[in-house]
Amino acid sequence: MRAISCWTRLALLVCVLMAVTGCGQKGDLYLPEGQTNLIAAG
């Protein structure tokens, strides 16, 4: 069996971290309250 390459492991780790950090956020796109005002004003 071939070992998983370093890039494949890194990509998998990034995907898992993105999924974990997205858990429990509000709505489809979570923006903290301070940044929401900047986007609406600009």
Image (cartoon, rainbow, N blue to C red):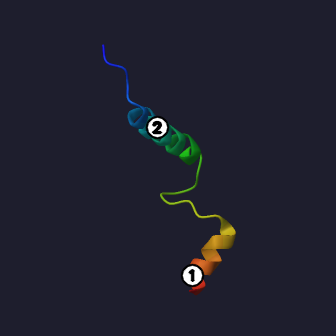
Image quarter where the N terminus lies is: top left
Q: Which residue is mark 2?
A: 10
Q: Position of residue 28 (x, y in %)?
A: 47, 57
**Is the residue marked by circle 2 packed among few (<14), some (14-19), or many (20+) residues within 10 Å?**
few
Q: Residue furthest right?
A: 34
Image point (54%, 47%), residue name: 22
Name the amino acid type tagged 1.
Ala
Q: Which mark is residue 14?
A: none
Q: Position of residue 4 (x, y in %)?
A: 38, 25
* 5 horizontally vs 35: left or right: left
- Counting every numbered tag in the picture gives 2
Please state, as top left, top right, bottom left or bottom right, where the C terminus lies in the image.
bottom right
Q: Nearer the viewer, mark 2 or mark 1?
A: 2
Mark 1 lies on residue: 40
Element class at badge 1: helix
Q: Residue furthest top?
A: 1
**Furthest-bottom residue in view?**
42
Choose between 39 and 24: the one closer to the eye: 39
Distance (Cα) linking label 2 and label 1: 35 Å
Dot 2 amino acid type: Leu
In the picture, measured across the screen, residue 41 lies left or right of residue 1, that is right
N-terminal label among 2 and 1: 2
Of residues 12 and 29, which is closer to you in this image?
12
Q: Quadrant of residue 32?
A: bottom right
The residue sitting at 58% across, 51% down in the picture is 25
Residue positioned 51% across, 45% down in the render: 18
Query: Relative to 8, does residue 38 appear above or below in the rendering?
Result: below
